[in-house]
């Protein structure tokens, strides 16, 4: 499932492709993924595109908003005027957004897990109010307060979108490795220095992953291709850590978790 760096990469690309253009008309091909109400945005202008947590928000004229959840296999493809979508992707198209400059944006979903919904400002604010703070914006004091206030293990805690958003299985494991913290440790047992290290490593890892356009392990692809942060992964789905110690794999919160028992205490 795309995490913060993957979604942020796509948002930055959509900004360049969409902002300022009018959506002439929308074709909804699969109502299980794309709300049929999305057709109502025909004639609207794209005002802004941004990310909140792992979601993409496309703001349209008239205070209308598209809330996009990519889930595991959701992709956007941009087709310039006069070009055609690759036939391989055509069979997975669930919506087409035909733009005023003759270009087209398609939304593709292989396993139909994602969603695109049309919301009012009030409905959008209600949805977003359920989420925790952004990890790239949160202060250390706020982060420390959140961690010390939780009773569960640290990995599951930082992956809880109501606690702090955007961090999934990949980046939780990576940040915890570089912070030197065993993912099964209880939040309340962490020292001030350990919390500070984790805070700094979450930010560092996420920013570095954004720079490399995310991590492509299986299905993730952004509008211009694949990410390459997978080349820099320290522990996720690896056999050895950067110091050549054998890694252990455990399950936390129902997710496979790789860690180094020598580097992480």
Image (spheres, grey):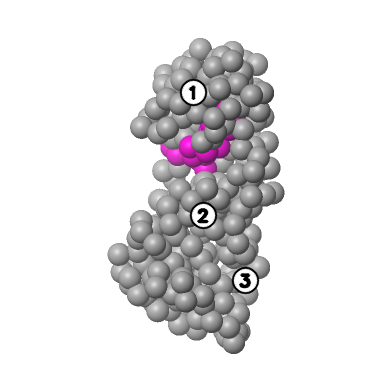
* Place of residue 40 in the rendered image (x, y in percent of width and height, measured from the top left): 39, 77
Q: Badge 2 is on which residue?
A: 220
Q: Identify the element where label 2 is drawn.
A: loop
Residue situated furthest left in the rendering: 32
- Residue 67 position (above or below residue 18): above
Gap between marks 1 and 3 measured at Cα: 43 Å
State the residue position of label 3.
17
Q: Residue at x 59, y 15 (%)?
A: 262
First of labels 2, 3 by sequence position? 3
Give the distance between the C-alpha atoms of the residues marked 2 and 1, in whole angstroms: 26 Å
> Which numbered dot is residue 248?
1
Q: Are marks 2 and 1 in contact (CB under 8 Å)?
A: no
Q: Is residue 216 magenta?
A: no
Q: Residue at x 46, y 17 (%)?
A: 186
Sequence-wise first label, 1 or 3: 3
Task: Please report contact status of discs 1 and 3: CB closer than 8 Å, yes or no.
Answer: no
Residue range in magenta is: 161-176
């Amino acid at each position: 499932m795309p995490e913060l760096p993957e979604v942020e990469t796509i948002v930055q690309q959509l900004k360049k492709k969409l902002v300022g253009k009018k959506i002439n008309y929308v074709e909804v091909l699969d109502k299980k993924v794309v709300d049929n109400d999305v057709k109502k945005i025909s004639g609207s202008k794209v005002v802004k595109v941004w990310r909140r947590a792992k979601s993409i928000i496309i703001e349209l004229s008239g205070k209308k908003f598209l809330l996009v959840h990519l889930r595991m296999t959701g992709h956007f493809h941009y087709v310039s005027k006069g070009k055609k979508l690759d036939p391989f992707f055509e069979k997975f198209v669930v919506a087409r957004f035909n733009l005023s400059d003759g270009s087209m944006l398609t939304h593709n979903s292989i396993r139909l897990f994602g969603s695109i919904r049309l919301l009012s400002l009030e409905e959008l604010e209600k949805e977003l109010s359920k989420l925790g703070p952004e990890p790239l914006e949160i202060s250390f004091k706020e982060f420390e307060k959140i961690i010390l206030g939780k009773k569960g293990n640290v990995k599951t805690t930082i992956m809880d979108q109501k606690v702090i958003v955007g961090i999934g299985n990949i980046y939780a494991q990576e940040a915890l490795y570089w912070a030197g913290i065993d993912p099964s440790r209880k939040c309340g047992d962490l020292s001030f220095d350990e919390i500070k290290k984790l805070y700094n490593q979450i930010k560092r890892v996420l920013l570095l992953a954004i720079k490399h356009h995310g991590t492509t392990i299986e299905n993730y692809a952004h509008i211009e291709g694949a990410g390459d942060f997978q080349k820099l992964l320290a522990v996720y789905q690896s056999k050895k850590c950067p110091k050549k110690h054998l890694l252990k794999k455990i399950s936390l919160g129902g997710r496979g978790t790789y860690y180094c028992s020598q580097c992480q205490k």
